[in-house]
């Protein structure tokens, strides 16, 4: 019952007053004899009683009700932060507490409603902004899930609908297997930003996994995009990352054209120098051979998921790379190196850049067209009076030696090594120069890269600073041919070779193969004695390709090596080849 204790207090007071009034009335009525005075006294006593009761009600109830009214008027005026204070031991204090709780609830509800209204207005403003912003903009949380707020330009750039709710990697790299490495790199990068927001300040072109990447739209068109990252914080805490994408397809294509123009100019200069040195004949042969190799490679692409096809493709491209190196065609050599990079990814099961193969092959063909054009121009020049002074019929063997010497010096400089290169032949002009060219180039490059030590290492080993490499061509008694390539470098460390072969799975740990079996491991497809890849080696192709080329001629190759003293490779070709 409401105000129960107040009612009890009032009832008690009224009862006491009534008893006192009754007792006083009885006593006084006994004293007064006049009936009129008795009536007047009774009325006066009753009025006094009512007045006393009113005063009691005013003190106990009405004053507090008036106070409540004033407090309610204050709150009704909009002051929801006002609090009632009652010092009382009855229900009025409890009522004040209940009113305080009620107004606190109303205040909280108003705040929530105002916040919801603000959020709604903000959402409408954001939606309006996102519809009109020119950049592809999205937000991701710690789980890398794209929020439902993203710009209309993002939809147009990527040609995708219903972007919200997707994982960022699924949105950008939907091919989970073929794009596994890119997905992993991106996810690791985003997690790093959330865990350490200071990393935002160190993002640059080198470490940004979304800098200038090519992706495929739903309509099949390839576009170049560039992504930048921005913090979204709440009370100093990183809660979301905003990524802004800009399409750079036109800029990328323009840069590619400029690069091609620069490369073409550089390539023309390379070609002119080489043609002047060798004459047009070797170049026409190089183009014809390379055309055949590229044809094989294009056929291989159709079944590129096969391990054997990948290894064969490596040998094909490596052979063309050797020929390009021989002629000092840096641009073609670089393109072949790029093809090897992609094939290395194929070896690991990552086929994401398969589409790039055709683009690089087309670039190589463009270079060949320039060579043909230059050869035609060079032919016209040679027929002129000025061109007759040039000797374009140089001995092919002499040209071979001169080109090898230039190539070897260039490779040694690249590796900060010093070499002395010598060449000897029993033939005036060995007729199989073109047939042995690629195997010899492979072996010479290996001699510089693996065999010859750095000058400081050679000094410590008691050798001269310059490494010696010798190539000789002689005729056997059976009228076959012997080609030897010898160096005074570090030779083969068979213990180290065994460890590498075990590590890479070419032999089992419990096996203890002899030197002959370890040497045979060197000629296995995919084997390389180093983990890093240089411009000269590390692909696991060289000696495998050498063996295949020699076997095609019906020949054999052998190795004699002395650890820390050097190695000799001997190629024996059967009679009847010339």
Image: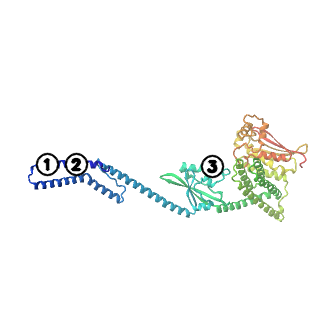
Q: Is residue 441 above or below residue 274?
A: above
Compare marks 3 and 1 and give the one earlier in the sequence: 1
Q: Residue furthest left?
A: 33
The picture quadrant where one finds residue 148 is bottom right
In the image, which disc is placed on residue 567? Answer: none
In the image, which disc is placed on residue 13? Answer: 2
Compare marks 3 and 2 and give the one earlier in the sequence: 2
- Distance from Cα at disc 3 to Cα at disc 1: 105 Å
Q: Circle 1 sits on which residue?
A: 26
Decide if residue 354 is in sight here: yes
Residue visible at 69% across and 53% down in the picture: 353
Q: Using residue 232 as the reference point, say whether residue 271 is left or right of it.
A: right
Q: Label 2 near label 3: C-beta < 8 Å? A: no
Q: Circle 3 sits on which residue?
A: 184
Task: Residue 489 in the image: state x and y as whole percent.
Answer: 75, 41
Colour scheme in use: rainbow
Name the one closer to the observer, 242 or 397. 242
Residue visible at 82% across and 52% down in the picture: 400
Q: Of circles 3 and 1, which is in front? A: 1
Compare marks 2 and 1 and give the one earlier in the sequence: 2
Element type at mark 2: helix
Element type at mark 3: helix
- Distance from Cα at disc 3 to Cα at disc 2: 85 Å
Q: Of circles 3 and 2, which is in front? A: 2
Element type at mark 1: helix
Decide if residue 208 is in sight here: no
Task: Residue 157 in the image: state x and y as whole percent.
Answer: 62, 61
Q: Of circles 2 and 1, which is in front? A: 1
Q: Using residue 563 as the reference point, say whether residue 141 is left or right of it.
A: left
């Amino acid at each position: 019952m409401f105000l129960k204790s107040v009612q009890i207090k009032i009832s008690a007071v009224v009862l006491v007053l009534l008893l006192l009034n009754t007792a006083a009335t009885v006593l006084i009525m006994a004293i007064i004899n006049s009936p009129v005075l008795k009536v007047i006294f009774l009325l006066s006593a009753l009025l006094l009683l009512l007045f006393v009761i009113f005063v009691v009600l005013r003190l106990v109830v009405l004053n507090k009700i008036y106070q409540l009214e004033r407090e309610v008027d204050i709150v009704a005026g909009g002051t929801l932060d006002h609090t009632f204070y009652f010092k009382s031991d009855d229900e009025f204090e409890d009522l004040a507490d209940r009113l305080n709780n009620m107004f606190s609830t109303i205040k909280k509800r108003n705040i929530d409603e105002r916040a919801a209204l603000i959020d709604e207005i903000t959402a409408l403003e954001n939606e309006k902004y996102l519809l009109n912003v020119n950049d592809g903009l999205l937000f991701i949380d710690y789980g890398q899930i794209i929020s439902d707020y993203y710009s209309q330009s993002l939809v147009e750039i990527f040609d995708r609908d219903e972007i919200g709710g997707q994982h960022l990697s699924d949105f950008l790299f939907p091919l989970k297997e073929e794009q596994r490495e890119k997905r992993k790199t991106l996810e690791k990068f985003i997690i790093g930003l959330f865990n350490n927001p200071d990393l935002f300040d160190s993002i640059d072109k080198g470490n940004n996994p979304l800098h200038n990447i090519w992706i495929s739209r739903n309509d099949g068109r390839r576009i170049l995009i560039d992504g930048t990252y921005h913090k979204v914080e709440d009370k100093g805490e990183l809660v979301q990352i905003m990524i802004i994408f800009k399409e750079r397809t036109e800029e990328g294509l323009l840069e590619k054209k400029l690069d091609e123009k620069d490369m073409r100019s550089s390539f023309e200069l390379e070609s002119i120098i080489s043609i002047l040195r060798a004459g047009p004949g070797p170049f026409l042969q190089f183009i014809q051979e390379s055309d055949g190799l590229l044809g094989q490679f294009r056929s291989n692409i159709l079944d590129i998921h096969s391990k054997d096809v990948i290894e064969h493709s490596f040998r094909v491209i490596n052979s063309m790379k050797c020929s390009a190196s021989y002629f000092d065609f840096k641009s073609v050599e670089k393109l072949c190196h790029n093809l090897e990079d992609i094939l290395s990814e194929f070896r690991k099961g990552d086929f994401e850049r398969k589409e790039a193969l055709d683009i690089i092959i087309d670039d190589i063909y463009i270079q060949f067209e320039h060579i043909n054009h230059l050869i035609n121009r060079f032919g016209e020049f040679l027929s002129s009076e000025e061109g007759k002074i040039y000797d374009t019929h140089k001995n092919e063997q002499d040209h071979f030696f001169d080109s090898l010497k230039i190539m070897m010096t260039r490779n040694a400089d690249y590796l900060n090594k010093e070499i002395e290169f010598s060449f000897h032949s029993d033939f005036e002009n060995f007729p199989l120069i073109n047939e042995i060219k690629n195997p010899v180039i492979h072996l010479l490059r290996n001699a510089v890269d693996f065999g010859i030590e750095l000058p400081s290492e050679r000094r410590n080993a008691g050798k001269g600073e310059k490494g010696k490499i010798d190539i000789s061509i002689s005729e056997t008694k059976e009228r076959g041919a012997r080609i030897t390539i010898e160096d005074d470098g570090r030779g083969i460390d068979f213990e180290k070779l065994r460890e590498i072969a075990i590590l890479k799975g070419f032999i089992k740990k419990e096996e203890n193969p002899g030197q002959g079996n370890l040497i045979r491991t060197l000629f296995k497809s995919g084997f390389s004695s180093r983990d890093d890849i240089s411009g000269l080696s590390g692909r696991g192709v060289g000696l495998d390709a050498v063996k295949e080329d020699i076997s095609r001629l019906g020949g054999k190759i052998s190795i004699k090596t002395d650890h820390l003293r050097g190695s000799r490779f001997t190629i024996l070709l059967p009679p009847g080849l010339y």
